[in-house]
Amino acid sequence: MKSVLLIGLGRFGQHIARQLDALHHQVMAIDRNESRVNAVLPYVTNAQVADATSEEYMESLGVSNFDVCIVAIGDDFQSSLETTTLLKELGAKLVVSRAARDVHAKFLMSNGADEIVYPERQLAEWTAIRYTADHILDYIALDGGHAIFEIAVPQKWIGKSVEEIDVRKKHGINIMAVKSGGKMQMNITPQTIFSSNETILVLGNQKDIQKCFHI
């Protein structure tokens, strides 16, 4: 369980609050808008109507005691930038800031952000990949051009083993798990046989995966 300071409770911030609650983390939430604060009260440990650009207020929170500080402000870049800078100046361990554009990301990174999230861009990329290929069920982008895909077992793989397919040698792709009936089998061996109605989780360079599975 981690302690999280969440700043900005628009739609994105509220979704984060719900997910953090589901993961049983302790969350302190802040927003200038009282109705937004009230909306997350069932999901957070504490929530306050406050201005996160106020140095006096932020100093009173002891931001250095939080494991993660998330700046989810999306409608006021100036406030996002000021808040990000202030958090780092006050000794925040990890500052994750929301950006809508590359230029915003550059300013945020140069003013204290340790990590940047692009919710709109990341969702757009996921949607484009997920819904333009019938056999792709999920997709997670990783650093360095790598990704994890959940893919329906190709017809030509059914009845064959991991060793026979040998996609690791041919394409540099790792088969992480096989999923069937909602259950995940992580113990993959060279003798694992692929069946119909299964999906597989594969990890590798995104271009290699796209080439292998004709995405």
Image (cartoon, rainbow, N blue to C red):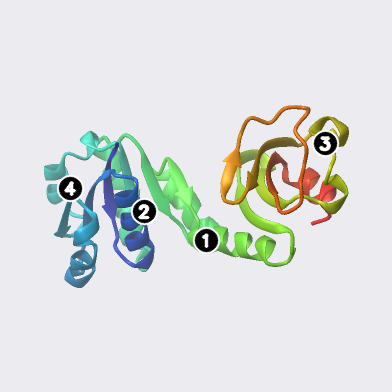
Residue at mark 3 to residue at mark 4: CA–CA distance: 52 Å
Residue visible at 73% across and 66% down?
Answer: 132
- What SS does tag 4 mark? helix
Residue at mark 2 to residue at mark 3: CA–CA distance: 35 Å
- What x and y, as percent, mark residue 89? 27, 39
- What x and y, as percent, mark residue 138? 62, 55
- What SS does tag 3 mark? helix
Q: Does residue 170 appear in this view?
A: no
Left or right: 127 as drawn, with respect to 92? right
Label placed on residue 101: 1
Q: Which residue is denoted by mark 4 in the rendering?
A: 58
Mark closer to the observer (4, 2): 2
Mark closer to the observer (3, 4): 3
Q: Does residue 104 appear in this view?
A: yes
Q: Which amino acid does label 1 sit on?
A: Arg
Q: Is residue 72 above or below residue 174?
A: below
Q: Which label's residue is closer to the chain start, 2 or 3? A: 2
Q: Which amino acid does label 4 sit on?
A: Met
Q: Which residue is denoted by mark 2 in the rendering?
A: 19
Q: Is residue 38 above or below residue 48?
A: below
- What SS does tag 2 mark? helix
Q: In this view, does 131 lie above or below 20?
A: below
